[in-house]
Image: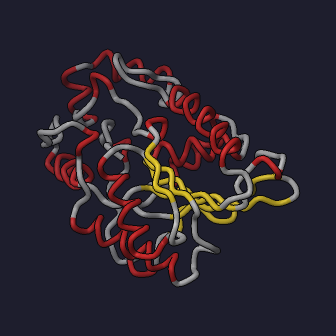
Amino acid sequence: MISGASRWPRRLWLIRHGQSAGNVARDAAHAAGAERIALDQRDVDVPLSPLGERQAIALGRWFAAGEGNGRPAVILCSPYARAHATARLLRDAGGALPDAMLCSDERLREKEFGILDGLTTAGIAAQIPEQAEFRRLLGKFYHRPPGGESWCDVILRLRSLLDTVSLHYAGKPVMIVAHQVVVLCMRYILEGMSEAEILAIDREGDVANCSVTEYACGARGLELVRYNVVTPMETDAAVTAAPDAMVAARG
């Protein structure tokens, strides 16, 4: 838990983007036992799937109906297409205050997978077995593939982002729309967790597409209100497969 109430937004929502075309392709590759995910575009350009668009609109309407304990005055989002589209659709569906700003910030981008990008777990074992062994030895928190990032690298840039949030948006309702690893790493920072604690949460299951993780600022600072809550309209939607089943999860 981060203390110092006057420094922080009065409410902070962390949202994972809606289902993407990458999530769909990843699940198909996993089901087929393929070594590579069938995508022909940069990770930054992967769009939402039709279901992902519906999820984002449903979440915006959920906030508009008062279910979110308020609405954001500013939305900070990853510049990746799937996250930016989620934020825009959510806002346009009434999920933010009428004059809410939508600001892209590259520090919220997806974890970079480097040479592992696009490979499934089977693909890594077959094509780059030494990286599979490094990851086994180091653990996912510290393993940094060549050209990519570890969770610690993501945490470092998110600490910088939170400095910006505290400087510009103290006392305001703020929403962050990003990726699964970003949501988990934000929990690690905001709640002062250990490596073991955050990885235990990760093992419990995915951060669902368009789920809500919410913090409120009280006398002791930012405190968790709810984690990984999915809007009622989307509870019937299939949750995409766990990203560790496909290391380049494009989450």
Where 40 sits versus 96, above or below? above
Front-most of residues 106 and 18:
106
Which residue is depicted at the point 30% across and 72% down? 54
Residue at the spot 54% in from the left edge and 70% down from the top edge: 97
In this rendering, is residue 202 above or below 10? above
Q: Position of residue 32 (x, y in %)?
A: 14, 48
- Which x, y percent locates residue 45? 23, 43
- Could you say which is closer to the camera, residue 143 or residue 70? 70
- Asked which quadrant contains residue 243, the reply is top left
Left or right of 219 in this view: 169: left
Q: Quadrant of residue 234?
A: bottom left
Q: Position of residue 73 (x, y in %)?
A: 58, 63
The residue lying at 43 percent from left, 25 percent from top is 149
Residue found at x 18% / y 50%: 25
Q: Residue extending furthest front?
A: 99
Q: Is residue 66 left or right of residue 128?
A: right
Q: For this view, does 105 lie left or right of residue 240? A: right
8 vs 177, left or right, is right
